[in-house]
Amino acid sequence: MPELPEVETVRRDLLKHLIGAVFQDIKIINFKNVAPRAAFLAKFLQAKKIKDISRRGKLLIVQLEAVKDFPYLLFHLKMTGQLIYQDNKSSLFGGHSLSNQSFEAAVGGSLPNKFTRAYFSFKQGGVLFFNDLRKFGYIKLVSASQLQEILANNYGPEPLEKEFNLEYLTQILKNKTAPIKAVILNQKLIAGLGNIYADEALFRSQIKPWRQAKSLSLSERKKLLEVIREVIKAAIKARGTTFRNFVDARGEKGNFMQQLQVYQRQGQLCLVCGDVILKKKIAGRGTHYCPTCQK
DNA sequence: CTTCTTGTTACTGA
DNA sequence: ATCAGTAACAAGAA
């Protein structure tokens, strides 16, 4: 699933191609989560230039140049979204025979495919495809004040920035009876962790995911803070995790799968103690853990 | 056929 | 009012 490291990987890829790029044609296909209406969005974007691409948590923010009313184009990939950029030289529009192809097989195939919900061509040449099997993702054009409101109301500090420190972590865990996993998954408290990195961080800090947040000791909070930063950094370095269908903006898989210690390793042996990794549902999510290492 | 998958939000109940 | 837990969303895999 696209979490912070995956969205950051896509952002860095897109930056290389799209700064200064000018939108030409925009097509929205069988996709409801577009605001304002698809027809308006398509027309509005024509001839607009991309000034910058930033990120907050799992939200990708494309800033348009010299636009007063709606200067920000937001992309959220949710569970199965992909943003893939292809330049002129790649074989485009060869996907018409893919209607019966499975999604797994479609990863890396020609575009657009049956899961392409929108695409944007640029004056320079090149096309950006938004693919999304489950259609949970969204595209939203917003004003500066709307963006401020979205960020202020829904996104806590970035794990790699200094606002995410021991004092802050202590404060958000204080008095909370919810499981620690639920707290670190809450985007309003920490922006960017999802199921993969939450499980990995709790394993690496040797904390059972269902422990009440307020029960963490000072040394556990220190450790958790440190490993969240470590695992996010390492995952960005590895260009993210492809468990099912995440791909970067080049259409390629991430490499962090090889460094996963508990996620999707249920039934296999713990790399630290040799006990069997287990899986159960915590905070409504499949949760992987070592019954021996995590206290 | 049922069950599972997950990011986020809406809802429910305490 | 606040918090915690869960259903819903979509669509495919097992």
Image (cartoon, coloured by chain):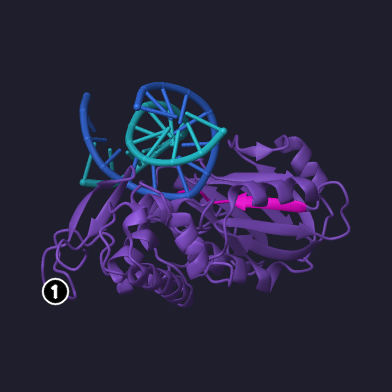
Chain colours: A purple, B blue, C cyan
| Chain label for disc 1 | A
Q: Position of residue A197 (x, y in %)?
A: 39, 63
Position in image of residue A4 (x %, y %): 51, 62
Q: Which residue is mark 1?
A: A273
For the residue labelled by badge 1, is the local secondary structure a helix, a strand or a loop?
A: loop
Q: Residue at x 61, y 66 (%)?
A: A11
Q: Is residue A76 magenta?
A: yes
> Magenta part mainly helix, strand or loop?
strand
Magenta span of residues: A72-79
| Residue A106 in view, yes or no | no
Q: Is residue A210 shown above or below A55? A: above
Q: Nearer the viewer, residue A213 or A108?
A: A213
Report whether A34 appears left or right of A21: left
Q: Nearer the viewer, residue A107 or A186?
A: A186
Residue C13 image position (x, y, % from top left): 29, 46
Quarter of the image holding residue A56?
Answer: bottom right
Q: Residue at x 65, y 39 (%)?
A: A34
Residue found 10% across the figure and 67% down from its top: A275
The quarter of the rendered structure image containing the N terminus of chain A is bottom left
Residue A292 in the image, given as x and y percentages of width and height: 14, 65
Viewer-nearest residue: A51 or A230: A230
Specify the quadrant that holds the C terminus of chain A: bottom left
Q: Residues within 10 Å of mark 1 (few under 14, many from 20)?
A: few
Position of residue A112 in the picture relative to residue A281 (left or right): right
Q: Residue farthest to the left? A: A275
Residue A239 appears in the figure: yes
Q: Amino acid type of disc 1?
A: Cys
Q: Give A219 or A56, whichever is nearer the viewer.
A: A219
Residue at 47%, 50% (x, y): give it.
A186
Q: Is residue A74 magenta?
A: yes
